[in-house]
Amino acid sequence: FWKARTERMLLWAVVILDLGTLSMSLPQISDKNFTAECVREHNEARSAVSPSSSNMLYMSWDEALAVTARAWAKHCQFKHNIYLKEVQRVHPTYHSVGENIWVGTPPSHFSVKGALKSWVDEKQFYSYEANSCKGMCGHYTQVVWANSYKVGCAVQLCPNGIKHFDGREGAIFVCNYAPSGNWFGKKPYAEGNSCSECKDICERGLCRYSWTPDWDPDNFSKNFKVILIVRPIFLILVCISAYAVRYFYPDVFCYE
């Protein structure tokens, strides 16, 4: 009796642990709510800079940056991507890419808002006037770097821990930026009245453009999908036309 009861208790313990593991899921880069939150939190921080910025660009999502962030996050190590300085190794178009990393344990501690807050809180160590840090502030300056207008983020579950951080199960959140910020000797943005240097739309203190060229990296994936759909249809129409000509005009010959 006691043996059977003990076995049942152990079985339930295993089931409960398995359910706990299954319930721990983190958002994917295809999750629209996740991508929207990443963009929103970044732009809220950029809108709130003090002193105000005259040239802060609105930040938007970049799928290629997110793919790079995901690929590096899978390494589960608290270390910057070693390929960032290699041209076109981390993005097909942008030659300079920046990166912020957040790590935490247990994984349930992760939230986009919390991770961004930890980076933005570094502003207390940054002096805009002196353009210097009294402590760590590079994550903050990258978030509010005016010309970094593209972002792509990913979060990864690390069951076996995060190298250089903690051996327990954790989560690593990586955001990549383009063009990269934190250029030596330069301030993250120009001080002035919000949007005073905007050439198009001003949205909550950020410069946003209502039009982008068809060769912009952000439009590449959309154009590529259109090509994939239109090209087969065009080939089918060509084949039908050729067959129709041969059927209705069997005596037509072509000479070179």
Image (spheres, grey):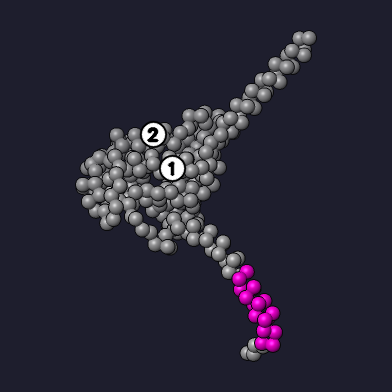
Q: Position of residue 90 (x, y in %)?
A: 49, 53
Q: Is residue 106 above or below residue 39?
A: above
Q: Secondary structure at mark 1?
A: helix
Count the marks.
2
CA–CA distance in space, label 2 to label 1: 19 Å
Q: Please, which residue is most extreme toward the bottom here?
A: 255
Left/right placement of residue 159 relative to residue 100 reads: right
Left/right placement of residue 43 relative to residue 104 reads: left
Q: Is residue 22 magenta?
A: no
Q: How many residues crowd around disc 2 within 10 Å: few (fewer than 14), some, or many (20 or more)?
A: few
2 or 1: tag closer to the N-terminus: 1
Query: Which range of residues does the magenta coloring cover?
Result: 236-252
Q: Secondary structure at mark 2?
A: helix
Q: Is residue 227 above or below residue 153?
A: below
Of marks 2 and 1, the one in the foreground:
1
The residue depicted at 34 percent of the width and 40 percent of the height is 44
Q: Does any portion of residue 6 appear in the rendered image?
A: yes
Badge 2 amino acid:
Ser
Q: Which residue is mark 2?
A: 118
The residue depicted at 51 percent of the width and 42 percent of the height is 31
Q: Main secondary structure of the magenta part?
A: helix
Quadrant (top left, top right, bottom left, bottom right) of the N terminus: top right
Q: How many residues crowd around disc 1 within 10 Å: few (fewer than 14), some, or many (20 or more)?
A: few
Q: Is residue 247 above or below residue 21?
A: below
Of residues 136 and 155, which is closer to you in this image? 155
The residue depicted at 40 percent of the width and 37 percent of the height is 116
Mark linked to residue 36: 1
Q: Position of residue 152 (x, y in %)?
A: 45, 47
The residue depicted at 57 percent of the width and 66 percent of the height is 231
Badge 1 amino acid:
Ala
